[in-house]
Image (cartoon, rainbow, N blue to C red):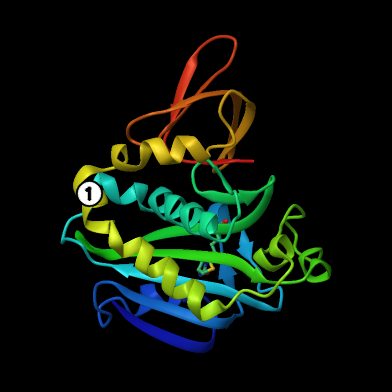
Amino acid sequence: MNIICLEKVDSTNTYAKTNIEKLADKTIIHTLRQTNGHGRLQRTWIDIGGENLFLSIVLKPSNEYKEVYSNLTQYLSVVLVKLLKEYDINAQIKWPNDVLIDGKKVAGILSESVIQGNNFKGMVIGIGININTDKKDLEKVTDKDATSLSVELNKTVDLKTFLAQLTEGFFSKYDEFLEKGFDYIKKDYINSACFLDKEVCVQMFNEKKSGIAKSVTGKGELVISDSEKEFVLSIGDIL
Ligand code: BTN
């Protein structure tokens, strides 16, 4: 694992995608200030001040795209929830990969694949975690229900230590995860899921679907049902 630390960059994901040919497999791009971060469903990810984590993991596991790669964001959400337990924080996962504390978002994850022609060049898994942001700055975020580790713990968290723990946690079971797929983390994922048996609204590009969240399949898809039938969703975000 290599770590590239940048003082400031528009987006660690954009940097990783632009330079993917030159970057080795398992390179971490980390920055202290991100000026144009982006999120899922064309959202922005704002650097709200304070000391937060903005990083992207460059992965080049094969020359062809495999279905299991789409579950890497869920794998990372499980890794983060486990790490937060070590900090005595009980976090939850909102499908597919938002990490919340008492319903407030603490981390967002975005994966992007790089494909040139027919060639799969790799994946970039970006994560933003609110580490040391105070309440006042959190209120400036458009996504109102946000929190940070320092707010939850009432103390400052060492950013470097957290970065090392997160990336080590990610790579410790990464090979096994790629071999076994979502089933390998399904139990842990379900144990942290905050959406099951609840009425949810899922945003999928320009369409929304509402229903009761019934279950998560062995491929990480969300099963929802309305009064008429069941739907299996593989893309989207619970709002
Ligand atoms: C979301 O919740 O919509 C996902 C947010 C992902 C934000 C991270 S911050 C580091 C990396 N660089 C980006 O531009 N986005 C991701």
Tell me where residue 91 appears, x and y as whole percent.
Answer: 59, 49
Residue at left 53%, top 73%? 54
Dividing the image into 4 quarters, which one contains the C terminus? top right
Nearest the viewer among 10 and 166 is 166
Q: Can I make out residue 136 in this image?
A: yes
Q: Can I make out residue 220 in this image?
A: no
Residue at left 37%, top 63%? 169
Total marks in image: 1
Nearest the viewer among 108 and 176 is 176
Q: Would you identify the image quadrant in which residue 61 lies?
A: bottom left
Disc 1 under 8 Å from ligand 1? The reply is no
Q: Is 210 displayed left or right of 114 in the figure?
A: right
Question: Dot 1 corresponds to which residue?
Answer: 66
Q: Residues within 10 Å of mark 1 (few under 14, many from 20)?
A: few
Q: Is 170 displayed left or right of 95 in the figure?
A: left
Instruction: Report the amino acid beneath label 1.
Output: Lys
Residue at left 58%, top 65%? 129
Tell me where residue 83 appears, x and y as whole percent.
Answer: 48, 59
Tell me where residue 93 appears, x and y as whole percent.
Answer: 54, 44
Q: Is residue 35 above or below residue 234?
A: below
**Could you say whether the residue bearing mark 1 is in a helix, strand or loop?**
loop
Q: Is residue 177 above or below residue 129?
A: above
Name the outermost residue toward the top.
228
Residue at left 32%, top 41%? 182
Dividing the image into 4 quarters, which one contains the N terminus? bottom left
Q: Is 156 displayed left or right of 212 in the figure?
A: right
